[in-house]
Amino acid sequence: MCISGIQYQQLDEYIQAGDRRIIDLRTKQAYDRCHIETAENIPFEQLSVYSFQKNEKIIFYCDRGNSSLMACRNFNRQGFDTMTVMGAFASYRGKYLWRRSYS
């Protein structure tokens, strides 16, 4: 089994294409502070209670990469088409970064 890793530049291309579900595995608090636009927040600890369609293509990301790698591995074993963002959220420098503004 091979886990596909993508760079943040490729993530921007997938966001523009709109054909992949992007899942942020970080805590709700981390997501609320800053996240990648279009990403859904499903904390890693809660991932098993969500249902996904087998035909969905999924990109996972987390803080450091460990959780997204585990999620990819687990979902690949179940027949899903998954990818992880290499370098995790900390490496993202793309144009779809959303930050809460504090006014």
Image (spheres, rainbow, N blue to C red):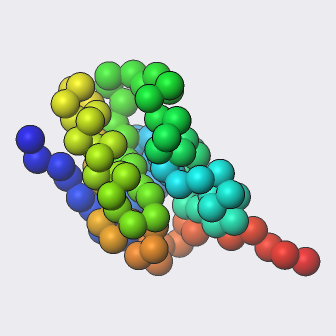
Residue 25: x and y in percent read 49, 50
What residue occupies the far front of the structure in this picture? Answer: 45
Q: Residue at x 58, y 46 (%)?
A: 41
* 11 to 55, vertically: above or below: below
Residue 42: x and y in percent read 54, 41
Q: Residue at x 26, y 36 (%)?
A: 74
Task: Locate residue 43: give its quadrant.
Answer: top right
Q: How many marks?
A: 0
Residue 34 visible within the image:
yes
Q: Residue at x 68, y 70 (%)?
A: 99
Q: Is residue 103 left or right of residue 13?
A: right
* 54 to 60, vertically: above or below: above
For the residue pair 52 and 65, the one nearer the viewer reads as 65
* 93 to 39, vertically: above or below: below
Residue 1: x and y in percent read 9, 41
For the residue pair 43 and 81, the one nearer the viewer reads as 43
Task: Locate residue 19: give its quadrant.
Answer: top left
What residue occupies the far left of the structure in this picture? Answer: 1
